[in-house]
Image (cartoon, rainbow, N blue to C red):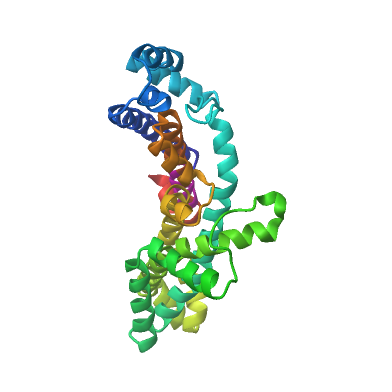
Amino acid sequence: MLRFAVTRFISLALSLLVASVVIFAVIEVIPGDPASYMLGMNASPEAVEALRERLGLNDSLPLRYVDWITGMLAGDFGQSYTYKVPVADLVAQRLWVSLPLAAYALILSTLIAIPIGLVAAAKRGSMTDYSIMGVTQLGIALPNFWFAMLLVLVFSVSLRWFAAGGFPGWDAGLWPGLKALTLPAVALALPQASILARVMRSALIDTLGQDYIRTARAKGLTRRQATVRHALRNALIPVLTIIGLQFSFLLAGAIIIENVFYLPGLGRLIFQGITQRDLIVVESLVMLLVFAVILVTFLVDIAYAAVDPRLRKR
């Protein structure tokens, strides 16, 4: 198990190194000068040059890359060109919106998907199975931002059960905060629940066809007992992968939803950083989200090994 974990950790470190180089290179080739953007079109060349020098934009690319990476390793993500505050402070403020939103959406999608996947597998080939698969296909096909606007129209404009957008802050209390995140979480959870339900059904059907399940049935176990005691655990292996990837996606891919609901999260901060040419915010946030994705993948691999001992020998 230790060897397996060390191997995966080395792979994680190499992936982060490659990702950092790619992110830095992509951000640097984006057209536009942050200093010119900050000072406006009427700024003199001398003022723009002075600001570039103060921001370190005149340093060589290798030096800027090394300064950025070493700073991030030390917990210093740099200073925002626009907000004039450390990027770490902005991340800390916005993370308390994006992280609960991702967790909320993941919990909703899991609670919806696993029972639905179990029912579809148990009723394989029936009208119930076809109906569930049809609904999940529709859930995958619908864009989540369109579904988000539909939720706003129904539950905010018509029924007035939820606010159309904004976030009151956790200082206002747990319930007001969760209530503000409910519609965005539902909008994010719908396609994820659809994907997870289909994976759960396929994995369970495949597991139920294995020899050891037939042996368990031959020993007198009912289909339900064989499913719960033996098949479900092995069927959860691919489901764990999807859940891990979904959490990463929900944390890093909620830019559109956060803008639809005007949530002050990481996704909206990235969008604002791009529009304002705040490069240090964009590259630091993207790197942080890539780290979250790779870390979750690493944890999923460890969970794999815990569930399936055969993987520890690889």
Q: Nearer the viewer, residue 154 or 95?
A: 154
Q: Is residue 166 left or right of residue 311?
A: right
Can you say whether 184 is above or below 303 in the image?
Answer: below
- The magenta span reads 293-304
Q: Name the residue rendered at 49%, 51% in the picture.
A: 303
Query: In this view of the protein, can residue 210 be seen by the observer?
Result: no
Q: In the displayed structure, would residue 62 be above or below residue 294?
A: above
Q: Position of residue 54 (x, y in %)?
A: 46, 14
Q: Quadrant of the C terminus?
A: top left
Q: Is residue 281 visible?
A: yes
Residue nearer the viewer, 154 or 110: 154
Residue 241 colored in magenta in the image = no
Instruction: Please tell me which residue lies in front, 240 or 101.
Output: 101
Q: Compare residues 175 and 263 and report the one nearer the observer.
A: 263
Q: Position of residue 246 (x, y in %)?
A: 44, 55
Q: Would you identify the image quadrant in which residue 104 lies? A: bottom right
